[in-house]
Amino acid sequence: MSVNMNHLEVFMKVAEKMNMTEAAKALFISQPAVSKALIQFENTLQVKLFIRDKQNGLVLTEVGKEMLSLARQMKEIEDKMVQLACQENKLLRGKVKIGSFPAASTNLLPEAICLFRSQYPDVTIELMEGNSNQIKQWVEDRTVEIGIVASPFDHYDVHILEHDSMVAIIPENHPLQAEHEVSLEQNRNDLIFCKGGHESAVLNTLHEQQIPFQESLTVQTAETLVHMVQKKLGIGIISKFTLSSVSHSLIVKEIIPRITRDIGIIAHSFDEATPAAREFVKVLGQLYRSSE
């Protein structure tokens, strides 16, 4: 049994788009050609890769999910071979797929991308944005090769880029305006924080300090958090790193107990990453690596 690489490319694109028509447009071929290639690929493997569901459309089978992970690994190996050959010829080409959360995209990536492009103009960068938990999953299933996330970093290889800490934000004329610090214990029922990176640091610290906490309001983005605080719905708990990427006129206060986290770049293995990805990690490290 041999795998047709064209069929593999079609399978990956259909799995990415979960739509035959959109996959055909992305591949610049007809929809019947996509359907035919996918059927031939399934026949070659003698497995069903997708279920055609009336309500949900295309859905990957369990074996389809495993095949997709392997297909992405094969694509990484192909890219690595091409990039190694180009590197040997002093010309790095290819693509780096990066996952990043919005604050990291704003604070870290513009200068890094600018410097990287000046050194490697023939390398394409593809950026996907989400929260830290989403990005870890993208790295896990190889949707992206490297990801910029907040701690904890789980089992991944990691290079620390920034040390970060949490602060409280309140509107003008708030009762705590004159206070130097905000006690999380005294205000535990009035806290608002973001999911996907902030809540882990907050909840872990509250648990360690044995501070009881009743979740009242959580949001998905820093912008929404700022808006909620401006509307006097609670005390916002947010990292300094994330807050620096958002325009606001709120009052910033230190908190008790202190809550810290790290921002880092992760991968399955930096040693096994493509040459282009390794070079991008090197550029990020040169610009932002924190002193240990």
Image (spheres, rainbow, N blue to C red):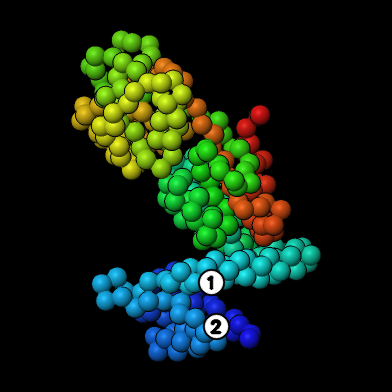
Could you tell me residue 257's position as x and y percent? 44, 18
Q: Quadrant of the N terminus?
A: bottom right
Dot 2: within a 10 Å radius of its alpha carbon, few (fewer than 14), some, or many (20 or more) residues? some
Q: Nearer the viewer, residue 9 or 59?
A: 59
Instruction: Return the x and y of residue 35 as percentages of the image width and height.
Output: 42, 86
Q: Quadrant of residue 36?
A: bottom left
Task: Assess whether mark 1 and mark 2 are in contact (beta carbons under 8 angstroms).
Answer: yes
Work out whether 251 lies above or below 229. above
Element under disc 2 = helix
**Left or right: 125, with 224 as reference point:** right
Q: Mark 1: which amino acid? A: Met
Q: Residue at x 66, y 71 (%)?
A: 78
Which label was assigned to residue 67? 1
**Which residue does the image show at 61% across and 82% down from the upper left?**
3
Q: Which mark, by number, is residue 291? A: none
Calculate the distance from the C-alpha at mark 2 to the C-alpha at mark 1.
10 Å
Q: Relative to 275, say whether 151 is above or below.
A: above
Quadrant of image for the C terminus: top right
Earlier in the chain: of badge 2 and badge 1, it is: 2
Pointer 2: what residue?
Answer: 45
For the point 47% across and 84% down, the residue is 38
Residue sitting at the far right: 88
Q: Is residue 286 visible?
A: yes
Which amino acid is tagged 2? Answer: Leu
Measured as percent of width and height from the top left, residue 176 is found at 28, 14
